[in-house]
Image (cartoon, rainbow, N blue to C red):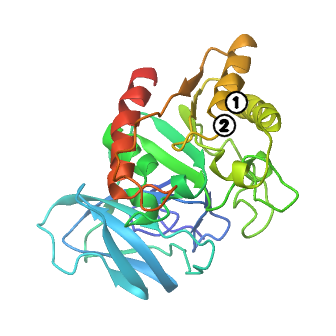
Amino acid sequence: MVQAAGDGSPGDSNISFVGRWNKSNATAYVPYWAGAYLRVGFTGRTVKLKQRNTIQLWASIDGKAFTSFTGSGTINLTPTALAAGSHTLIVSYRQVAGSYQGDAVFQGLTLDAGASTVKAPARPKMVEFVGDSITAGTTSSQLAVTDYGFKAGERLGFDHSQIAIGGMCLSETTDGCWAHETRYWMSSGGQAGTDQWDFTRYTPDGVVINLGTNDKSHGVSGPDFQAKYTAFLTRIRAKFPYGKLFALRTFIGRYAAETQAAVQARNAAGDVNVFYVDTTGWLPSDGLSDSVHPNDKGHQAIADRLAPILSARL
């Protein structure tokens, strides 16, 4: 039974759950994909999370830098008490993927006696970022929350989600690359089942797609990639008739011509709200942690270039 609003329970209507969340259990909400987060205002001087088992998470209070917490049971997000008054909280759990199998589940907030949750100020837009390990923030210091998508969304004051898992392709391949052409439409990307996502749960104003880095390694030909990218854009358009779609050139340039051609095909079909974003030169020389993945400096540089483009179009 959902408790009354204002008490910090999962069903508290003052809490905004952004991204893809499983809410089938009224006492335990589970985030799917990378970068899903909860956002809420609260009164009092302290706030704690009720966790089931061990998880790593990141929390930001009153817009300050995200702080890492790891634990289970009651996790105190305010070891130093805050000033009395109203505050805002954002919590993002580490994605359960690959070798990391923490227990990402939100069971509620514990507040001071007499304190309550309040609705955080509404955000004007929603942007969804679709990709692979780069869009999941792999090798950055705080994973999803130090990723270019999370950073761009926060910089703009928009809600944002990251539909990304390490190793993903656009295309299904014979050697088993997980592919957005099939898994984007699922709640959990196939990690914990094959349930289909309910696209009426939220409607992004913009969808940013960064795919192709892994397809090349799995032998997908240029013509096949272009055809699949065009089909992917067409299917997303059917789900979000009025959203702006942004197809990024992969940061190391794989399938750049094919990505641009897929956008041009959609434009030629009459869809004027699909845009190719040329990312050439966005990464500084020291912006990669390896040959592919941006480090914190790289993700910040990407966010700095991408945010104005999104702001101008949305």
Q: Is residue 180 above or below residue 143?
A: above
The residue tagged with tag 2: helix, strand or loop? loop
Using residue 80 as the reference point, say whether residue 144 is left or right of it: right
What amino acid is found at the position of numbered circle 2 in the picture? Answer: Tyr
* Residue drawn at point x = 36 percent, y = 29 percent: 308
Badge 2 crowding class, 10 Å Cα cut-off, few under 14, some 14 to 19, many 20 or more, is: many
Q: Which mark is residue 258?
A: 1
Residue 238 visible to the viewer: yes
What residue occupies the far left of the structure in this picture?
A: 83
Residue 6 image position (x, y, % from top left): 39, 62
Residue 84 image position (x, y, % from top left): 12, 66
What amino acid is found at the position of numbered circle 1 in the picture? Answer: Glu
Q: Which residue is mark 2?
A: 255
Badge 1 crowding class, 10 Å Cα cut-off, few under 14, some 14 to 19, many 20 or more, is: many
Residue situated in front as seen by the camera: 110 or 167: 167
What residue occupies the far right of the structure in this picture?
A: 174
Residue 156 image position (x, y, % from top left): 34, 37
